[in-house]
């Protein structure tokens, strides 16, 4: 059987959950009450946008190596 790697899973799931919670908190504390704001007037959309931003934040970036830095100078 394959062993589940919880570190890899948590690297993506935790930022998504944190983003979703922050998105809902944005709706709750700052959101638009009149309904004229398409994003902030609905808790589902702000939670979804927060989760999406958490997912984007979770993707790794390329690290520069010393060799690449020296070749550019």
Image (spheres, helix red, strand yellow):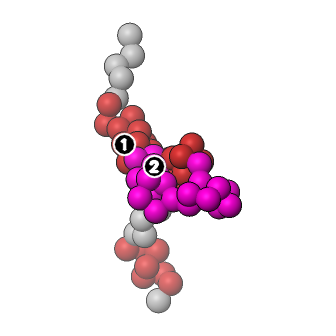
Which residue is farthest left? 7
Tell me if label 1 and label 2 are in contact, CB under 8 Å: no
Which residue is farthest bottom? 73
Residue at position x 34%, y 19% from top? Answer: 3
Q: Which class describes the residues within 10 Å of circle 1: few (<14), some (14-19), or many (20+)?
A: some
Residue closer to the observer: 15 or 59: 15
Figure disc tally: 2
Badge 2 element? helix
Can residue 19 be spotted in the picture?
no
Residue 38 horizontal/vertical position (percent): 67, 57
Residue closer to the observer: 49 or 25: 25
Residue identifier under label 2: 24
Tell me if residue 13 comes above or below residue 37 in the rendering. above
Badge 1 element? helix
Residue at position x 40%, y 69% from top? Answer: 65
Q: Quadrant of residue 60?
A: bottom left
Residue 49 horizontal/vertical position (percent): 56, 52
Q: Which class describes the residues within 10 Å of circle 2: few (<14), some (14-19), or many (20+)?
A: many
Tell me if residue 26 comes above or below residue 70 in the rendering. above
Residue closer to the observer: 62 or 9: 9
Residue at position x 46%, y 62% from top? Answer: 30
Residue at position x 40%, y 47% from top? Answer: 21
Residue identifier under label 1: 14
Tell me if residue 17 comes above or below residue 54 in the rendering. above
Q: Point out which mark residue 53 bears.
A: none
Of the two numbered discs 1 and 2 in the rendering, the one whose residue sits closer to the viewer = 2
Query: Relative to residue 33, is residue 3 drawn left or right?
Result: left
């Amino acid at each position: 059987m394959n062993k589940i790697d919880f570190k890899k899973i948590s690297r993506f799931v935790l930022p998504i959950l944190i983003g979703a919670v922050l998105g809902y908190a944005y709706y709750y504390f700052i959101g638009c009450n009149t309904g004229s704001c398409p994003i902030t007037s609905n808790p589902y959309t702000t939670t979804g946008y927060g989760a999406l931003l958490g997912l984007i934040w979770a993707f790794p970036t390329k690290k520069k190596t010393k060799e690449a830095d020296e070749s550019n100078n």
